[in-house]
Amino acid sequence: MTSQKDKFWWKKAIGYQIYPISFFDSNDDGIGDIRGIIQKIDYIKYLGVDLIWLNPVYRSPKIDNGYDISNFQEIDPDFGTLEDLKELIELLHQNGIHLIMDLVINHTSDQHPWFIQALQSKDNKYHDYYHWVDGDANHLPNDWENWSGDFEWTFVPHLKQWYFHIFNSKMPDLNWENPKLRDEIISMIKWWLEFGIDGFRLDAISHIKKMPFDNLMADVPSDKDKWSVHTNVNGFKDFLELIKNVFSQYPIFTVGEASGVSSSLAQIWTGEQGYFNSIFELEHNIHDETDLNGRPIGNRFQFKNIIDRWQTDTRSFGWMSPYLSNHDNPRALQTWGDNKSSKSAKALATILLSLQGTPFVYFGDEIGIPSFNFQSIEEINDPEAHIKYDSLITKGENPQDALSEIGVWNRDQGRSPMQWNSDKNAGFTKGTPYFKVNPSYKKVNVEQQIKQNDSTLNYYKKLIALRKKNSALNDGEYYGIESNDQNIFAFIRKAKDKTTLTLVNLSENQNKFVLPEKILNFNWHPLINNFIGNLKIEKKISLNPWNAIILESDDYE
Ligand code: NOJ
């Protein structure tokens, strides 16, 4: 919004992540699109959020759902046109809503004209826009592997060279050492900012600098992240400085995807000194193991501790963008809730919307869509899940077991279409949806929840409105509170004139929270409670299963 005077407007904003392909289909081709978002602006206003993060809508072959970009300055025809996007931005701005887009500058699609040219010959002027190593087909340049267990190199026989890619082989990494490439990226960034967007979410930004390729993953000690060969490598700050110089000329909001960043090192990333206004930490969503029930080990206790540590470590200097789930994870309702009840969805919402920072709600979480339960591998689109599945089959696992293993944690679990009503395809499309609609839509949908006063949706709406007008919730500093039960998440947000106390019972059992003396001595009254009934504020507060409460005090010191 060009008229935006306040440079720090984003500190009071509440974000909403839209995964466009799954949001709303305006032309019945089965794929969500920009005009679909335009048609749902009233819904976004109803919810009360005022900052949209739109996942990629750029031209792309969609090997990785749009993160493989073949033209940075065009909109993919599946999603619409640049004119549609302009209209969306104007309409959002008229309603006081900002919009940020993904900035994917670690890699492109292999269909990007730069890479097509780079493939032509070693002398082509675009060749050096990517990373190449001479060699032969039988000898990989090094042992670097990505998270799917795939080598990060692909051989091009006619060049007798390998090219480097952290992600899919159809997503070659850009060579940031090349000044010409850097200039092109900078002018592209300026072009988007002049177009009128309000900022960026920076994708995979910690990987733009790589170690020299003769460093081996095998040499990284086993207690260190093997990805350190291309994560936050010395010298990457020079690249980030260049980008920051452009950002600082605009009243925008930037949020970096802080892969491989620990809370103690976040200071160079966020806050006044940092490269971005804010960051998404990835730590709370790491689930590389499962328990005996096949549930990701990223359990509630760990979740609570990780969030608490990030909030505490960044309190004085930084600014976080808290979130629960996103398009790279199963729905939060599965991971930390019970994957079904409105009570547990509301408990998670209470945490998210009372943390310090600019929070982001992932589309669909506000109605409590559960994670998708896949019946066959054909129902999964995500190439990463297919790579894992194929490798399990190659190792001799039977298809059912391989599917169960993939089904516990994969990125498509949280990507199913938005559930607008109980009509066919949940009202997402009148065509054939590109992705199966989650069968929960008959019960869990927007239309029904708007009508129901105590729905998850209306609880989100109340929380959002509360956060907007409450100085402690939108501006206060975070202080974690030691709790007598590991399932209770308790913390304070303290502003000059007000303090709030959030208490959330992250379990299906009745629990009691013992109020520390220091807190008990002041006057507290409830602001919101996901259970109806009188709340007794006494030494031991009784919490129902999934009970979430925010209390407020005007005299707490
Ligand atoms: C992070 C994005 O969130 C993810 O969806 C994508 O696959 C990778 N970066 C590569 O762009």
Image (tube, rainbow, N blue to C red):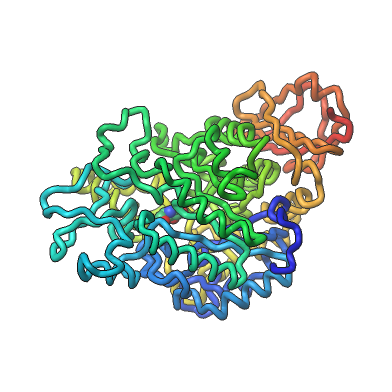
Q: In which quadrant of the rendered view does residue 119 lie?
A: bottom left
**In the rendered image, the vertical position of residue 371 relative to residue 218, given as above or below:** below
| The N terminus - image quarter | bottom right
**Looking at the image, which residue sits at the far front?**
179
Task: Locate residue 531 relative to residue 403 in the image: left or right.
Answer: right
Taking depth in this image into account, of 428 and 60 the one nearest to the observer is: 60
Residue 291 lies, in percent from the top left, at 41, 33
Residue 237 lies, in percent from the top left, at 47, 46
**In the rendered image, the vertical position of residue 381 relative to residue 460, given as above or below:** below
Taking depth in this image into account, of 390 and 235 the one nearest to the observer is: 235
**In the rendered image, the vertical position of residue 503 relative to residue 46, given as above or below:** above
User: What's the residue at 77%, 52% (across, down)?
Assistant: 468
Q: How many marks?
A: 0
Task: Locate residue 190 relative to residue 451 in the image: left or right.
Answer: left
Q: Is residue 115 visible?
A: yes
| The C terminus - image quarter | top right
Instruction: Ligand 1: give its quadrant.
Output: bottom left
Q: Is residue 21 visible?
A: no
Taking depth in this image into account, of 269 and 436 the one nearest to the observer is: 269
Residue 221 lies, in percent from the top left, at 31, 28
Q: In which quadrant of the rendered view does residue 211 lie?
A: top left
**Looking at the image, which residue sits at the far top?**
517
Taking depth in this image into account, of 220 and 515 the one nearest to the observer is: 220
User: What's the residue at 21%, 53% (across, down)?
Assistant: 133
User: What's the residue at 26%, 45% (across, down)?
Assistant: 213
Residue 85 lies, in percent from the top left, at 57, 75
**In the rendered image, the vertical position of residue 65 relative to residue 339, given as above or below:** below
